[in-house]
Image (cartoon, rainbow, N blue to C red):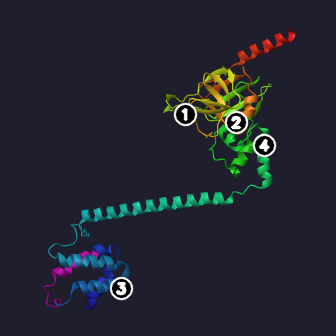
Amino acid sequence: MPDLMQFAIKTLDRPYSVQRYALLTHHWNMKRSNSAVRDYDPFRIWTAAAEVLTPNRVQVMFIANRALKNRSCPPFNSRGFFHMDTMKFKRRATSTITLLLLASVVLLTATEAYAQRHRRAGKTRVARALSRAEIKQAQARLAEMGYGRNALVVFQKWERRKITGRLTRDEFDAIMNAEPPQPKDPGYKHVEVDISRQVLLLIDDDGAIQKIIPVSTGSDKPYREKGGSGLAYTPRGRFRVINKIKGWRQSPLGLLYYPSYFSGGVAIHGNPSVPTTPQSHGCVRIPMSVAVEVYKQLPVGTIVLVYDDRGFVSAQDWAAADREKEQALRRE
């Protein structure tokens, strides 16, 4: 019996020990009829041998069980190598590898998402709060560029930034690095309404921007209210102020404060509600706080340009004609 034990240990310690063990197990089963070794259990012998060579113990126990369960069919192929149902083994191995790969992908994705959240949080924590001096500096810069009341919101509209109304470190940097706005049609006094940006520009006699004001124009949606219906549309093109009313004006669709009409019943007027998006029935709403000032700067005949990103019509020829008339009056 010790010889068998030594032989098992030597067999397991060699290269291809699994295949060699399979051969030896089959050989052992074939000789069980020998009375000298009939009372010895081959599974116990190989398990004991495996305990000496711990790394191979699991493989040995698996093969021993296999050999004992199927003694009539040797657990090796024609070349003497252990096969243990090759296709079944491949399927199990493929399933295991697939599960490991999926687990790795999920783990990597979760790790990357966690890292990104912490990077963003880190950036937020790193951003310094603005000092009072910086806030005053930003306000002065906005006023210098022509942004009046609600200057930060108007700046965000003009620069097509996200409208938040909050002065953050990013907004401060954008303000300090921004270029002053320029009129679409420079060189003469007029008013411009930029539908896309939702702002109104007051242009002085020298053709420079005097002030930029937030507006809310027509929503471009059909409406039906107060006995009337229509499309909430602000007309685009070049116009002149044709009529003005001081104070409040009751219209079919509501009250207008200091309206300056430029196209039929469409006017530039004050309104308590001036959202950051187009919400009017077609008029150009401006804040109540600047309504009187704008009213005074828009005498009848003032050129009004209304445009969006899709089109623009210049009124340089109208301005030239107005200058010729003024010069003729002076000569008289």
Q: Name the residue type under label 2.
A: Ile
**For the residues carrying marks 3 and 4, which lies nearer the camera in this image?**
4
Asked if residue 22 is positioned above or below residue 231 in the image, the reply reads below
N-terminal label among 3 and 2? 3
Q: Name the residue type under label 4.
A: Arg
Which quadrant of the figure contains the N terminus? Answer: bottom left
N-terminal label among 2 and 1? 2
Name which residue lies at 60% across and 57% down.
Answer: 120
Q: Position of residue 297 (x, y in %)?
A: 76, 28
Task: Examine the rendering and report whether any part of residue 149 can be seen.
Answer: yes
Around disc 3, counting alpha carbons within 10 Å, would you say few (fewer than 14), some (14 to 19), or many (20 or more)? few
Label 1 SS:
loop
Q: Name the residue type under label 1.
A: Ser
Q: Position of residue 328 (x, y in %)?
A: 82, 10
Asked if residue 240 is positioned above or below residue 285 in the image, the reply reads above
Q: Which residues fall within the magenta stretch?
A: 20-38
The Cα atoms of the two marked residues, 3 and 2, are separated by 89 Å
Name which residue lies at 72% across and 21% down.
Answer: 300
Q: Name the residue that disc number 3 marks.
A: 52
The Cα atoms of the two marked residues, 3 and 4, are separated by 84 Å
Decide whether residue 37 is among the magenta residues.
yes
